[in-house]
Amino acid sequence: MPKLVIVESPTKVKTIKKYLGSDYDVVATMGHVRDLPESRLSVDVKKHFAPKYQVIKGKEKLVEELKEKAEQSSGVLLATDPDREGEAISWHLAYLLGLDTKEKNRVTFNEITKTGITNGMEHPRCIDQNLVDAQQARRILDRLVGYKLSPFLSQKIRRGLSAGRVQSVAVRLIVDREEEIRAFQPEEYWTIDAKLIPQGARRAFAASFYGTAEEKRKIASRQEADQILADIEDAPFQVAKVKKGTRRKAPTPPFITSTLQQEASRRLGFQAKRTMKAAQELYEGVDLGELGAVGLITYMRTDSLRISEDAIQEVTAYIEQRWGKKYLPDSPRHFKTKANAQDGHEAIRPTSVELSPDKVKDSLTNDQYKLYKLIWERFVACQMANCLQSTTQADITAPGASGTEYLFKASGYTVTFDGFTVLYEEGKDEETKEEGSLPPLENGMKLKCKEIAGNQHFTQPPPRYTEATLIKALEENGIGRPSTYASTISTITNRTYVVREGKALKPTELGEVTTKLMKERFPKIVNVKFTAQVENELDDVQSGKTDWVETLDDFYGDFEKTLKQAKEDMQGVKIQLKEDETDIICEKCGRRMVIKTGRYGRFIACPGYPECKNVKKLVQENGADCPKCGGKVVVKKSKRGRVFYGCSNYPQCDFVSWDEPTLEKCPRCGKTLLKKKGKKPKYYCVTPDCGYEKVEENEE
């Protein structure tokens, strides 16, 4: 009889079967099979937080099939994912199938390759009860917060609200940032920027006003800037000092879960959920034609930067063969993992560096290819030599008519050896001013001033969080775990605590009101340091240092008292959300309808509810007229969330466009101009035969 191997995902089955052969039967659970039922709390607080698990609704038939297969097999191996969740699923399976958890029936695969599967099968172990207890503690903790706190919020603010231990802190971070932005008072400042040309040269370089040799000077107004400009109107510029150096730029470490989500957001515009979906598919295996199904990356839920020696040797040989020995560092790079990281897995890397993105492109979806290319390039680059840059810093003097000698500074660099940048450089969250190269400069060299001007600026408030910067903040503050970031962000946007404006995350009124109530009544739940402390305690459970029941008891005692007090203090209190009134008249009762926010987004409703239950879809007009029928152009969203434009008279008028109709008319034929977004937006005529188009300049 064959042995039964149970995995989580059905897409893994084919790949694993290929390597194990006919002596094994591989089946999938399709995720969890037993959990706390949704209809009730299912945690007996008085009996040491005993959970009351049930087979998940709809999985009963699957569980019976697994029991039959287990009885007909010569043994059962539990090969669920190698993390807390996977360990818990194996534990639940062991209970349902009557397996002894003290037997070595648990195997893990860090990568779905022949090597990874062979290694996993050669090292079976017992189920790690500490991992299971850590998962149970988190699950029960989140259930207690969610099921005890959500009814309170629903009663005090709006029906259907939910609270979560990690999601509440994530919303608080976004709300706090919005309050910072509102409270920010911009300050005016000026810079003086000159374009200078060395004698005998043609190309100008930029230099910026610094102050004097004695001190840096801040220019606060146009008057100050104009005074300095007048003082140096005919001043001779001269190089006072040139400092040259060499700068070494090292590559970034390979990806862990959080940095993969951040970089995919910055570089590819992927939301965290989309990133993890593509990564899961790459891990589980992709059909590569003659090679069959192959897992292309190692396990994608990890916060360890460890790289196996075999992988380092393989990538070192690849770099030397492709780029030459000079592109290798003096010794292989080993990156230090954070103190609180789980080191059960390697960093995210390709399972075989020989499978370059170009080789597998035809077998991958667009998302899979883009993400694999990012992972592959980052991993290869992390074992390449530093980028070497020759830097130049120049102090330039300009004596003023008043006798003050002003100081300007210029800096630049040239790349003397590209190193790892020949392949990859990390993206940035914010645009930064790049240094350029400088012409050869020497002490005492006279410079001609081609252009000089004062430029007004204002200090800027901190930017709103994007997915990338929110994930970074959650990670830096120890909130949640990398594997939870995608679901946390999906939850707070789906429940309209937060909305997306481009890449930015902005709190809704609901998010702000809820956060205010939480800060006033449940300060610990939304306290960043306290939430991080809870994560550390869960890690202690995982490492066997702390008992999971004691951890829950410490948390719940204080939480229960706080909730009881809040209910007493707010008895009979209902918080009203602001409602924006519209010009639309309710045809049923004559009232002006208002904009409301519900579970599925914003909509228009009659304020006379519950007597009048009239509701309508919220239609957003962009101000332009339909080029086909003259109706109003409305903004719509596809099922995938992509914005497009259509006519308000649909279905009578079928006008639709991915590009935005504008108020501008074509100078050739008088029809509507459409705007195609980009770094330099392009405007073109809606009439294909016209052919008119223009590119908008000076817009980044």
Image: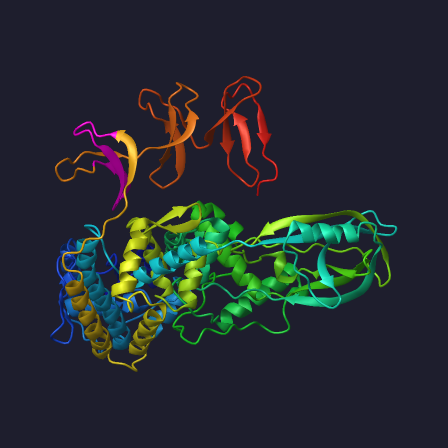
User: Magenta stretch: residue 366 in it?
Assistant: no
Looking at the picture, tell me which residue is in the foreground, 223 or 577: 223
Q: Which residues are magenta?
A: 585-606
Quick one: quadrant of the C terminus?
Answer: top right
Q: Is residue 206 visible?
A: no
Residue that lies at the very extreme toward the bottom in this rendered image:
545
Q: How many marks?
A: 0
Q: Is residue 485 left or right of residue 691?
A: left
> In the rendered image, which quarter is residue 22 located in?
bottom left
> In the rendered image, which quarter is residue 71 located in?
bottom left
Looking at the picture, tell me which residue is in the foreground, 240 or 78: 240
Q: Is residue 66 left or right of residue 581?
A: left
Looking at the picture, tell me which residue is in the foreground, 67 or 522: 522
> In the rendered image, which quarter is residue 562 located in?
bottom left
Q: Is residue 614 visible?
A: yes
* Vertical comparison of 218 with 90: above or below: above
Where is residue 375 shown, x and y percent of the image? 49, 58
* Vertical comparison of 399 with 365: above or below: below
User: Magenta stretch: residue 602 in it?
Assistant: yes
Where is residue 633 shown, x and y percent of the image? 39, 27
Quick one: quadrant of the N terminus?
Answer: bottom left
Where is residue 408 shown, x and y percent of the image? 75, 59
Residue at the image point whose x is 52% and y is 62% from the top: 379
Q: Is residue 207 left or right of residue 175?
A: right
